[in-house]
Image (spheres, coloured by chain):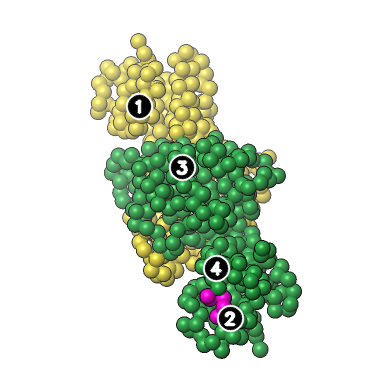
Chain colours: A green, B yellow
Amino acid sequence: MPEKVLIYSRFPKALMVRIGERYELFDAAGKPPNQNFSTEQLSDIRAMITAGGTPLHADIIDLMPKLGAVVCYGTGYDGVDLAALAKRGIVLGHSPGANAASVADIAMTLMLAATRRLLVADDYVRSGSWAGAKPSPMMRPQAGMPGRRIGVYGMGEIGRKIAARAAAFETEVGYFSRSRHDVPYQYFPTLDALAEWCSVLMIAVRAGSDTHHAVDANILKKLGKDGYVVNIARGSVIDQQALIAALTDQTIAGAGLDVYAKEPHAPDALTALPNVVLSPHLGGHTLESHVAMQDCVMANLEAYFAGRPLPYGVKLG
Amino acid sequence: MPEKVLIYSRFPKALMVRIGERYELFDAAGKPPNQNFSTEQLSDIRAMITAGGTPLHADIIDLMPKLGAVVCYGTGYDGVDLAALAKRGIVLGHSPGANAASVADIAMTLMLAATRRLLVADDYVRSGSWAGAKPSPMMRPQAGMPGRRIGVYGMGEIGRKIAARAAAFETEVGYFSRSRHDVPYQYFPTLDALAEWCSVLMIAVRAGSDTHHAVDANILKKLGKDGYVVNIARGSVIDQQALIAALTDQTIAGAGLDVYAKEPHAPDALTALPNVVLSPHLGGHTLESHVAMQDCVMANLEAYFAGRPLPYGVKLG
């Protein structure tokens, strides 16, 4: 009999095929599991798979008395109530670094598209404005990459990959993180100092209570009217209302966003802006990063059911 | 009395301010100069500035009997009738490398945007499809950068900068050019072999009769259904009809184009496609590359009027 695993978040079925070959999956599809499954069914569940950003509190966890492992698909686990897990002795797994290159690539894509105004450019061609030689203030030359100061907030695996890619564009790279790392980039002791220095702020920090709204009106003002912000981490790191205000009144020049305060919703005030590039949280969404994330999920589940420590575990408390 | 210089192509006035402070400019604004200027006025012109891709033949050149220098704004000079210049002993100048970083950056922007389907993604967010969880075949995960084979066609300054940037994305880089260069990338002896090997073909070769339609239906077929082509060189290097056919019937996966067969026109068959990213020949269009190109133009004009060889000259014949 295969072990029973609950799928808590809504995932495309294609992502779960490999896992479904090994385990009996109970797909809650983003709803409270007791809507689709009986108390008896839930009492057999010993492990669950979730998206790290999805809120997961004691009320859900306690529907499954035998639950012993929560495995996040991806690197983040900011939605998971760690105290509730610790209280019940439930272990937590994730997929550290599995999607780092894919996410770093989206950060670069958003930065280049925002600073070179790619969406406006594409529309300028498709609409016939180029052929008609229509003047377009948005198409005026902008500063390019060489010599630009790229500030990376967070120097984990994703931050390092962003920094390495940005450096290849002949930029200067600086960073802020809680501690100094052994990397060839200028360290700034505060986010304020980094924002004052850089012209593009790349947010690659782990979400949590200590980074909630860390990028606020004050930081955006320090970026300045030629400044850009790119967020591929979590929506919670930016004060989204302050960002919309800064973009609207051109306190900053533009933004590239893969994450939002309340996904999958991007407010109208944001989607109406021409100086933003928006993607639907697809940073980790490449074929090879899905394979790598699935590898981590499978390895975590296998270890858990065999009574071994998780190979990709998160230390709780 | 300042020297008289004809501006042949249509350039935004802002680009010519610095040059206008030093020389008396006669702006033909893209029309035959004898439409706006008298025979007498044209007889005083000793130098002209043009865009290298704009056709410039003996009929125009011979309107200016004292013309001694043609200076291209940018690196290309494929529109200039070199034989007509040589016949009259007119020297040719350009701006080699001045826009290389800016053009290489657009190549990367187009590659990343095409392979990660950025335009579709942005529209998916803005249209509300993401919030409505609408299925979208175009949003399925694609192969990312790590391990991708990037083929660079042409290994001049722009090709080298594209290769260095692409390598930072953990890709494999190969190239084809007339001769092998001292670069750390795999050399392919033919364009066929490069296209067979790579999944993204980056066109960075100088336009000319030897590269006209070098990327044809055969090369596109070798790229294959997961292949992409990015062109930041000149429209003439690709057989545009063959490209449109290959994109339409999905012989290749997509394309990123900054240049077209007949600029500023992009055919409807191209602008209707969802699997292309289009920009209006803005590769060299950054603040610092304009300054660098203007530096070259000024240095070339100054040398010419002082009777010295052009510092940024092209050898004719």
Q: Residue at x 45, y 33 (%)?
A: B287
Q: Can residue B311 be spotted in the picture?
A: yes
Counting residues from the N terminus, which is met first, the one under dot 4 or under dot 2?
4
Tell me where residue B108 appears, x and y as whole percent: 52, 48
- Position of B244 relative to B202 (above/below): below
| Numbered label attached to residue A218 | 3
Q: CA distance from mark 2 to mark 1?
A: 77 Å
Taking depth in this image into account, of A53 and B251 the one nearest to the observer is A53
Quarter-wise, where is residue A88 in the image? bottom right
Amino acid carrying mark 1 in the image: Ile
Residue assigned mark 4: A51
Q: Amino acid at mark 2?
A: Met
Image side of residue A41 versus residue B184, left or right:
left
What residue is shown with label 1?
B7
Mark 4 residue crowding within 10 angstroms, few (<14) / some (14–19) / many (20+)? many
Question: Alpha-carbon distance for marks 2 and 3?
Answer: 44 Å
